[in-house]
Image (cartoon, rainbow, N blue to C red):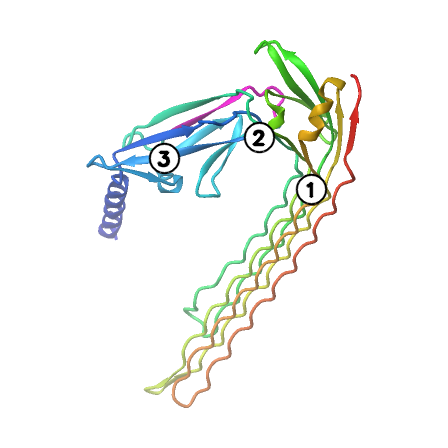
Amino acid sequence: MKSLLCLVLTLLLTNFTLFGQRFKDLIIEMDTVGKGLTYGKSVHFKFTTINKRGKKKEVDYKKIYDRITYDVTGGDFNTTTQNFNFLIRTKDKKYSGGAVRFYSLFPEDFKFDKTFLLVMNFKGGLVLRFKGTNGISGISGSSKMNPILFRDGKNGEPGSSGTNGLNGPSILVRIKKEKDSVLNRELTFLYVTDSSMAQTYVYKCLYPDKGIEINAEGGDGGAGGDGGNGSDGKSGINSGGTSKRPGNGGDGGNAGNGGNGAMGGRITVIAHTNAADLLGYLKLLNDGGIAGRAGRGGAGGKGGSAASGQLVGTNGKNGYDGTAGYVGGNGPPYVLKVEDF
């Protein structure tokens, strides 16, 4: 037993060493060329590996995440796509910039530590995200392995249902042109009050004609979890004086339902008389949230094959698909005003 454990440990360490030698060095670049670093905008990071021969190769972050991790302030990463984008946070009362640090998980194997600072320049259009929180997706049921002791397959586990999204907030937006004491020039200021949080956030931009998007949509419903697959029954045996019937397939698990999309929020915009011309650059969104997808029922397992003189085992039943959620209702019509304040 001790020798077996030593062998497994040796294989693991050897595999880790080989796995860690896929590249010798790493270059990380932050793309800010032609971009306005302002609220709600994304910044793309590019990863290039260098092997022992000096050959460079651009890769996705998922190719290096086992060796490189990161810490962030003032934003969030979107790693669900092939690109690796840093989304500058919008709901931060005193936001002036952010920072991203990439560093080695195992410094003794590969040393890397680099920090990128994101300094706001307020040159791009604004994207202010106050969308309601999305529902949480249901958990898919586990599929079952083929039986070892018993003849019949096991039933797949059911998937759980997604939760409902949360309603978009009621927000009041005040727009005014003012002189910025830091940049010493006139900027467009937006004072956004979120009644659901009893908070007022202040934003500013240099070029409002590049667009100002304010999103108070309802949260999307979470997807229903899929049902797990049933396992196959064992094959029948009828030879040498031994007879065992073919096993029946296990049933697939039922799927979870999708969560409902939530109601869109209420948006009221009051433009100061010196900013009345900016109302035409606004893009206001308060649609209802998207319905959560229904989960898919699990597949039933196959009945075991028959030996001579036997009947084939019964196939398991497929699980039922879940029901999709409902689309959330749109928020009320926008209110636009011009007045001094």
Q: Amino acid at mark 3?
A: Phe
Vertically, is 210 above or below 308? above
Report which residue position mark 1 lands on. Answer: 218
Report which residue position mark 2 lands on. Answer: 40
Q: Are marks 3 and 2 in contact (CB under 8 Å)?
A: no
Helix, strand, or loop for circle 2?
loop
Q: Which residues are magenta?
A: 92-103
Helix, strand, or loop for circle 3?
strand
309 part of magenta stretch: no
Helix, strand, or loop for circle 1?
loop
- The foreground one among 287 and 161 is 287
Label 2 – label 1 distance at C-alpha:
18 Å
Vertically, is 175 above or below 313? above
| x and y percentages locating residue 128 in the rendered image | 63, 30
Residue 121, disc = none
Report which residue position mark 3 lands on. Answer: 47
Nearer the N terminus, badge 1 or badge 3? 3
User: Is residue 103 something that shows in the picture?
Assistant: no
Vertically, is 2 above or below 151? above
